Amino acid sequence: MSMKMSKLVLNVLSQADSFDAVLDWQRGGGKKSLLEAATLLRSGRRVLITGIGASKYASLPLEYYLCSQGIETVGIEAGELLHFRHPAYRDSIVLIVSRSGESVEITKLLALLKGRQTILGVTNESESALAKNADCSLLIGSLADEMVAVQTYTGTLLALYLLGAAVTQELDAAIETVGSLQPEFSRIVTENMNAVEDWDSFLHPIHPIYLLARGPSCASALEGALLLNEIAKVPAVGLPVASFRHGPAEVVDEAFRGILFAPQGPTQELTLSLGRDLIRFGGQISVIGSEAELAGAHPVRRVPAVADALAPLFEVVPIQVAALRMAQLRGIVPGSFRFTQQVTRDEGSFGGGSALPDT
């Protein structure tokens, strides 16, 4: 692995340890809160999930899962909910997801909602405003990140997967499943970091990268674009596959770079079909998935064949590595920031250094 050991690189490599920490907490000291949160989610007429940045993206698989179980659930970005959309959801159980629990939109939402609606808080900081003000606080239990949400992102995915299982009263089985996958997750991290230079023939420092997915894997497309923006300072776009077909496909030419997320599932073939079209149009395509083959694409970066709701936990790892490699190729110190800090505390200005989208 030809990658300087920056703090961000170490955060990527330590994700297996963070996986263990989150799982141990959720089946141990955090289990009571997990079950309490699940009971509250079942008690409401509908569920509103909110967050911003990586935290919002990490909540997408839970939103999809609850909907698949017939539970009316909607996810809304915290800033949009705060300023525009809250009046339509005054009867909802509100699940707020925030790594820091302190970003400005989150603290303002707490002031707006506290005492009026049931608030469930999911955060990695036990002393945060979110943890202290939520009616039920769910601590993620992840190891901390230096700046970019890496192990806190996968930790949030894991904690919310277990929360979904608890809602449908399948927590013990989910804990067993996740535990059996820990060695595979560790292997995926190690193999991808050891093969970091395999991205060189695909990455291009000038042209935008499009990340395309369906279902819960939309989390991977959106988070992948964010990682490329934050770590490598390159333009990247995350979109659902169907949306890309309805117009944005016009951008495809020989310079096009597209990453498709194609986990095992009912829409895998639809995603691969798009890939075949993009290759036919001259684009360069990379696939992240299980049991997926695409003639003319770059070698598939394989992840385990798991349930749709768990696929994003594995899919994001190759993109973390791709963003690290792009930064290296561009001469950027991975994890360095020009305009932002870790927690956004001002909605209207970056001020003297300002803030990273909460994640």
Image (cartoon, rainbow, N blue to C red):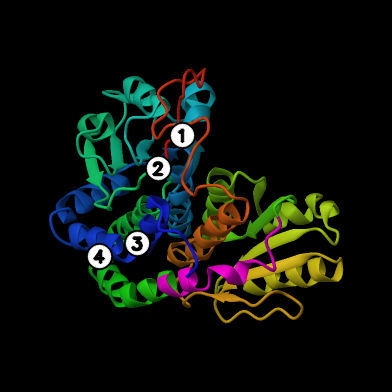
Left or right: where 270 falls relative to 155 = right
Query: Measuring 38% from the left and 71% from the top, which residue is drawn there?
Result: 185
**Structural distance between the alpha carbons of marks 1 and 3:** 21 Å
Depth order, front residue of 21/320: 320
Mark number displayed over residue 147: 2
The quadrant of the picture occupied by the C terminus is top left
Depth order, front residue of 126/73: 126
**Structural distance between the alpha carbons of marks 4 and 3:** 9 Å
Left or right: where 243 falls relative to 121 = right
Q: Is residue 206 above or below residue 258?
A: above
Q: Amino acid at mark 3?
A: Gln
Residues under numbered marks 2 and 1 in contact, where contact means CB atoms less than 8 Å apart: yes
Q: Amino acid at mark 1?
A: Leu
- Crowd band around label 3 with a 10 angstrom C-alpha radius: few (<14), some (14–19), many (20+): many
Identify residue for label 3.
15
Q: Earlier in the sequence, mark 4 or mark 3?
A: 3
Q: Earlier in the sequence, mark 3 or mark 2?
A: 3
Q: Earlier in the sequence, mark 1 or mark 3?
A: 3
- Crowd band around label 1 with a 10 angstrom C-alpha radius: few (<14), some (14–19), many (20+): many
Identify residue for label 4.
20
